[in-house]
Image: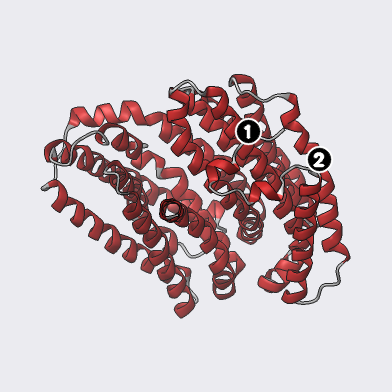
Amino acid sequence: MNRLSKKATDSLFLLAPAWFNRLKAIIFLPVIVAYIGIESYGAFVLIVANLEVLTPFVHMGMGQALVRYTSALDASNKTEIRKGFWTPILAATGFSCILGIGYALAIPSINETLMGGSDVRAVYASIPLLLANALALIVFPYFNSRKRFKEASIYRMLRDLLPYLGLVTGIVLTNDLFAGIVLLVILQYIFLGYLLFKISGETGGVGFDLALLRKYLRYSWPFSATIFSQRNIENIPKYLISSIYGPVALGIYNILLTIMRLILAFNIPFIKFAESHLPKMWDEGARSRASDIINTCTRYYFVIVCCCATLIVMGINDLLEIFFPAILENITMPLIPVMVAFSLFVLLYGINDFSRIFAKLEEKSLLVLSISLAGLTVIAVLAPILVRSFGLTGAALSQLVAALIMQVFYTVSLKTNRPLSSYMYTVKTLIPVLLAGTTYWVVPKQGILTVGMAALAGVCLFVLSTHILKIITLQEVASLGFSKAVQPTD
């Protein structure tokens, strides 16, 4: 029992930061929108998108290389550990200075083209986040490389929480996005400065090795390119929406996407389990068993997404009326088509995560990069056409098509062991979806309490029908230990 409790505690430490990172966006989103308005929130979305585009060129995936090349080093080998950590830190600092200058020069044009000439101070204030975000992606892998996973998880959660609270506090106190970002930047650097000071004491100072930097970059650049491609599959439609329809439309679009992307939090335990346990199983020759586990995890994720997405699609107007009443007057389009496209995109996005695990097990990192670039190409071609023709719905459809094509490429390229019977649950799940959606629709709703009761009734009926149809049985859910719960079923 103690062993089981320890495993549960360890899993909680590993999963909590990722879950919290998704939840905080939902928890504080109504507050941010209420205090700065939907237009300034749209500008904030663009600032975050700009940072996501540029940050991979700062960290260059070197956190992955840090784990790869320093994990085996003994703690007494401080010289190599020092060079292994500080080389990417110093390199990222240099890269961020170069990119930061270029970004600063481009900001007036970006502001005029994409932000409708809104307050440019917040954009300039965000430039230091280029380095801060990159440093975080190197600092936390350092703790993982030293096998200090709980410590890394706690620091990661604090880094996600404290600066974000600074952002929200600045916005609430001043009704100004600029003040919020300034406070966010200050708290980011205070926290990261503390971690760097702590690590410098452990490594005995600072070190740099140019040959080691070249070695890191040769290994890590595909990871950086993959991250860049994946981020822009979502960011290209955002840029198009803002340039064509303005920041208000972008703010609405991102609120809808953020609500639906919350479902991806359910994918985290399956991904963490697969990444932790399957490489050893694969290397020992139990590849069929590893494939069965991933297929079962995919089934669980598919069913959970279908349940949550159905209720979100049916209740999106109720959710907006309760939590974002001020933006309803800016919405003149039907929301269900947008949310259906988002739900299918999130479903495929999560399934693609499992396919990426297959690719890593088969040591095909370049395949992951190639497929990510293919998805980026598809959305770069489709999004301008669909966004101009169908607005926010077109943007969601472009992401859906890109994710679908990526999944087709994964399925064709990887030797996945998926018998025809393993796909039957996708057809069976249509029945619980219809039952849950109909239940939510027919239950009278007025206010948050009745909306919650309608959603709960839909969930109960969904769970019961999936058990009766043997898509996922209650016995599986009640299984003790995650390793038992992922046993494949007939």
Q: Is residue 388 above or below residue 252?
A: above
Say what secondary structure mark 1 lies in: helix
Residue 240 on image: x %, y %: 62, 46
Residue 479 on image: x %, y %: 60, 48
Q: Is residue 158 above or below residue 72?
A: below
In percent of the image, x 42 and y 44: which residue is there?
Answer: 54
Q: Is residue 286 above or below residue 107?
A: above
Please say which color scheme the image uses: secondary structure
Query: Are the residues tagged 2 and 1 within 8 Å (C-beta)?
Result: no
> Of callouts 2 and 1, which one flags the residue occurring earlier in the amino acid sequence?
1
In percent of the image, x 37 and y 67: which residue is there?
Answer: 182
Give the residue number, with chain letter if any, for mark 1. 295
Q: What number is the disc on residue 428?
A: 2
Task: Give the residue type that dot 2 points to.
Answer: Lys
Say what secondary structure mark 2 lies in: helix
Residue 307 on image: x %, y %: 73, 52
